Amino acid sequence: MRLFTTIMLLFVSFLSYSQQPEDFIPNSAISVFTINSGQVLQKISLDDLVKYDFMEDVQQELFDGSTSGKTLKESGINFDQKFNIFFGKGEKYEISGFTFGISSEDQLFEVFDDFEQQKSDYEGTEWYNSYFNHLIIKDKVGIMIRVSANYRIVRDFADSIWVTRGNKSSYYNDWYYNEGFDYIEEEVVEFTEEMEVETEENTSSPAQNEELPVAEEDPSQKTYFELRDSVEMVFNSVFLKEVLDDLLIAKNNRKKTTPILAKQLMREADGVFYFDNSKYNRHGSYSYRRPFYTNIYAFVDELYEENTIVGDIQINDGSIDLNVDANYNNKLGAIYEELSDAKFDKNVLKYIHKDNQGFFTYNIDVKKAYEKTVEIVMPILEETEGHKAMEWLILMDLFDEFANKDAIFKTYKGSMFGTFNGIKKVKTTKITYDYDEENFESTRKEVESEEDMPIFTFGFSTKNNAFSEKILKRIERLSRKEIYAKNGIWVVERGAMNSSDLYYILKNDLFIITNDEDLAMNHSEGYGKESLGKTLSKKAKKSKFLYGYSDLGKAIEELPRDLFSSRDNEILDAIKGKSGQVELSSTGIDTDKASFKMSYTFDGENEDVATYVLDLINSLYVNSK
Amino acid sequence: MKFFTYTIFPFLIFAFSACIEIIDDITINDDGSGTFKYTVNLSSSKVKINSILALDSLDGKKVPSLSEIQEKLHELSNSLRTKEGISNVDFHADYDNFIFKIKCDFTSLSLLQNAVEELAIKENKGVAIPELKKEWLTFENDSLVRSVPKITLIKAKKINKRDAELLKEGSYTSITRFQKVVDTFSNNSAKLSKNRKAVMVRTNPYLLIQNPQLVDNVIYLEEE
């Protein structure tokens, strides 16, 4: 018995110390998406899976013919373990990839058949490469990773070598040194021996919208492109080593260094996600401006410190639920708390038809938010050095002193709503050409036509309708379009997309813009008994800050498909013909977090659940990039 | 000249692939000079275009603003003015109905093709387009041979199924005019005007991208 107990204890201790795929998420990951459920992944074909952005970014070269007709179930992936997708963007490089458990290496390499093994520098690991992707296997866990050096670093370094060799560079433009920047601080990357430039040509294509230096005529010399590709390859391998040294030697990983992620990973959900918004702000799309506005960005960083977004996805019988918490520090929290402390404007409910196909209500108090922002931001700006900070301070002082804030916030209080009421055929004209049989000379002819027009209504609360009306009267005299008042409603002829009329309704302390003639001409005081039902009205009121609802059964048929991407349209096609509702609500806002819930409820069985969940993850992934 | 569809107006075609009417009208004088007119009529899709213009991006691509489109089209017409053998360039855009017309005179078909090729290369970030090296319009010994460059086939493959369906609703009209009377022509779908000096082929953009040879024609003129 003692022996049995000892064996059991040893087994348990082995289990508790064996590393899981989530223990190999690199520390530089900014966003992490974890799929817990085999239910989600096993049904998905590999060919469908690779269409998602989160997979495509990592291994677009991997899945060729080897994936045809196969599901993930047959790919050697262990579905008893978590499948973690990660993405990160830093000052020097981007990383993307995923970690997963392996049940069969043989099956795995039937799919990943382009990978070639190489000697691993890390003890206890196997290393495989395919183009820019690297697969490291450790203790039955796969780490698929790609590390890409940031373009600016590669370009600057390649330029530097190029110019040193006596060539001419066309890059540094005057804007780089324009006035108004606090100061310029360029990152210095040390050129070490191991970064010796190689001659490999297999690199990604250069950015297209730039004029590049002319290549050398001498074939023994590298052209600019070849040089830049070589530099890129070297940097990629240096940064890959940096990431892997931290992960496999120093044993750091995102879960270990981020308790909020570790906690999130413990949740019993079908999928969880984590997004570090503070880091995203540092390294996002506009990070190239940072060197020029260091002080202002330091201020923004302070405001966004500890700003993370975590969430979980639950697949239930008849619904998929997404719960999201946006965590922030008490400075940002104080602003959000004031912002959301607004009284719900019941008048908006009068203008939402009970048979609408989708609507949202958004309820904030801009005046309170402004006052709190001034209270928090001004002291930070006071202590911030630099031109920009001073400019902001002066503007804020001037606004605070001279602007009539009461009038401004009386006109726009902050609450708004919008509805989509489907598509309506509208009369329009088109030009056609008729041809004379004698000589095929053409004659222009204007004929009546019909086009599909999305019917929408958008409105916001105001206590200053008289002012808005005064402005409209002025515009009437100025505008080249026909603007006139009819039964107390302002009509802008062909104001909606140059085709149908647009209406401005200034009633019930609301400023409403719509192209719905029926609402404008017959229901300008609201829909009365035909307005939104009690259940949804109650939910919108209760949600206060944000509420959105769409009856997919009705909306999908009539959504203006041309305005959605091909991928969105594929999803819409999948949902088409099924009944269901999507609901988004805010469930609470306080000083440290704001919580939201999104539910997709559907009637009966829905075989596309896995697709929806992956699409949801994909949307989150794309938005987090 | 369907080539224009894929170079000068790529955005209009692929992003606004709605009900589109394209008219390509070329007049060839006896000495090989002539006048080229090209019209893109999107007036049947005004609402759709205005809706798209209201967006920031579509299908992951930035939607240009109306002023950016205006600027680009004027830049192209100005660029065309500078080309050898090209004169009297007249560009007209009706932004209420989304009708774009360009007209120019040329001293020879080969110079017209050179001008188009140069514009296309400029738009292609300076990279040469080998398919355009081959002449697709020739006029010799009172016969005109016209075809469509292979580049259109390559571009056609990039149109997704949904957009292609929309192109079925459009129309493509190709007119070739002469000073002399037409004797015969090879394209069975082509139609001869009553005065026998103009040949017209009508199809829709979808069929054309499926089979670019639809507007190919060899036209023989009567000897005087």
Image: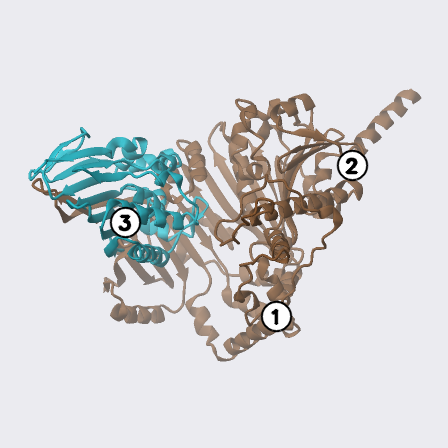
Chain colours: A brown, B cyan
Dot 2 or dot 1, earlier in sequence: 2
- Circle 2 Cα neighbour tier, 10 Å, few/some/many (<14 / 14–19 / ≥20): some
Q: Distance between the residues labelled 3 and 1?
A: 47 Å
Residue A15 location in percent, x, y? 79, 30
Mark 1 and mark 3 in contact (Cβ < 8 Å)? no
Q: Quadrant of the N terminus of chain A?
A: top right
- Nearer to us in this view, B148 or A247: B148
Q: Dot 1 lies on which element?
A: loop
Give, as a three-letter code, the residue at label 1.
Asp
Q: Nearest to the eye among marks 3 and 1: give it.
A: 1
Q: Mark 1 points at which residue?
A: A182
Disc 1 chain ID: A
- Which of the 4 image quarters holds residue B113? top left
The residues bearing labels 2 and 1 have C-alpha atoms spaced at a distance of 44 Å
Q: Which of A219 and A84 is in front in this view?
A: A219
Q: Is residue A194 above or below residue A175?
A: above
Tell me residue B218's x, y (percent). Answer: 20, 33
Figure check: A182 above or below A263:
below
In the figure, A430 relative to A41: above or below?
Answer: below
Q: Which mark is residue A122?
A: 2
* Residue ID at (58%, 56%): A167
What amino acid does circle 2 point to? Tyr
The chain carrying label 2 is A
Instruction: Tell me the amino acid under the disc marked 3.
Output: Lys
- In the rendered image, which quarter is residue A133 located in? top right
Label 3 packing within 10 angstroms: few (<14), some (14-19), many (20+): many
The answer to whether residue A84 shows anywhere in this view is: no
Residue annotated with mark 3:
B46
Image check: A415 left or right of A304?
left
Q: At x 49% / y 27%, what residue is drawn?
A: A605
Q: Are marks 2 and 1 on the same chain?
A: yes
